[in-house]
Amino acid sequence: MSLSMSQSSLPAFTIGLNALSAILDKAQDFANVKKIDSTVLTVWRLAPDMFAFARQIQVAADLAKNASARLAGIEAPRFEDDETTIEQLKTRLSKSVAFLSTIDPSQIDASAEREITFPLGTDNQGRMKGSDYLNHFALPNFYFHLTAAYAILRQCGVEIGKRDFLGAIPITMI
Amino acid sequence: MSLSMSQSSLPAFTIGLNALSAILDKAQDFANVKKIDSTVLTVWRLAPDMFAFARQIQVAADLAKNASARLAGIEAPRFEDDETTIEQLKTRLSKSVAFLSTIDPSQIDASAEREITFPLGTDNQGRMKGSDYLNHFALPNFYFHLTAAYAILRQCGVEIGKRDFLGAIPITMI
């Protein structure tokens, strides 16, 4: 009995991005009720030198897309980082989820021992074994940006909870 | 080539808790330099109805400890949630890391298909297949509370960055 690389990546990324999309709907509802421009939310930051909300979403989407592509050994589509509205951010997420659905899981499954090279910031590169890259770089970073986006909305007063963060996970309540 | 359940859980939890402990050192240094009582930080929250910093640490430590124990089919030690200082929180983390080091990885490896039942809040229970519990509940929640703790300190002005969050991961910089 073991896990597969695809099982620990594709469903986790897809569930997370879809959860984020549903959270964006709640953010839009909040903006409508409070009669505020939703871009007030998309530029909000937890600290002056942390990413704004929109950037947190872009980076979360790119982590899912690029990590999956690197593990599968294929090229990922590139998206412009030009979203400023919640609707545009939802489109970014749906394009990313659509890309994930095109990846053949068996290509990712073959990556556990393969060396993955990836950009770090603008000048550097990192190299990790595929399984380490997934467990210690892609997943922690993905959840970091998901949580940061969630926390920004919580701080702004949007009514979301841990179930919104976890999304449509395969759980039975008893 | 596949992943194992232990490989996707124990090292990720251990690296994350050790990263948090090093972040706590930086928080203590910050408090010393600014001449503030470190409990100013331990009670800080991102929103009034989100957990305070100390609770974020306790929950992150418990997620690592309890999820690993449930997957291994063993009993986890219970710790009182009575930490108020950074030093006490560091002790909580080191006790949790010490417990993780006692777990036989092969016990966790056998859990991918086993059903795991776990408390949800005070009144409910959830049930998930072992691999789903790890990928879609334990890991997302663990990183959620790690990120929340990190974000609280960033908001307070502690100088930490993404490398502090990721901790001692097996990466080669090229």
Image: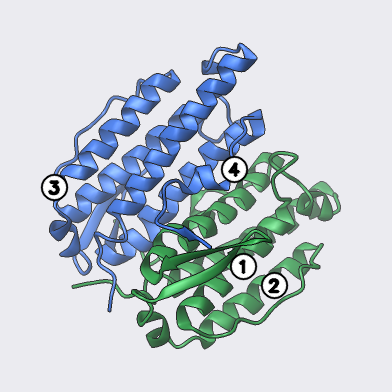
Chain colours: A blue, B green
Which mark is nearer the camera, 3 or 1?
1
Q: Are marks 3 and 2 on the same chain?
A: no
* Separation of residues labelled 3 and 2 (CA atoms): 43 Å
Q: Nearer the viewer, residue A7 or B16?
A: A7
Residue at the disc numbered 4: A161
- Callout 4: residue from which chain? A
Task: Using the image, tell me which numbered label, if any, was put on residue B61.
Answer: 1
Q: Are marks 1 and 4 on the same chain?
A: no
Dot 1, how many residues are within 10 Å of its Cα: few (below 14), some (14-19), or many (20+)?
many
SS category of the residue bearing label 4: loop
- Callout 1: residue from which chain? B
Q: Are marks 3 and 1 on the same chain?
A: no
Residue at the disc numbered 2: B92
Please identify the quarter of the rendering in which residue A8 is found.
Answer: bottom left
Residue at the disc numbered 3: A74
Please identify the quarter of the rendering in which residue A121 is found.
Answer: top left
Residue at horizontal 26 percent and vertical 44 percent from the top: A66
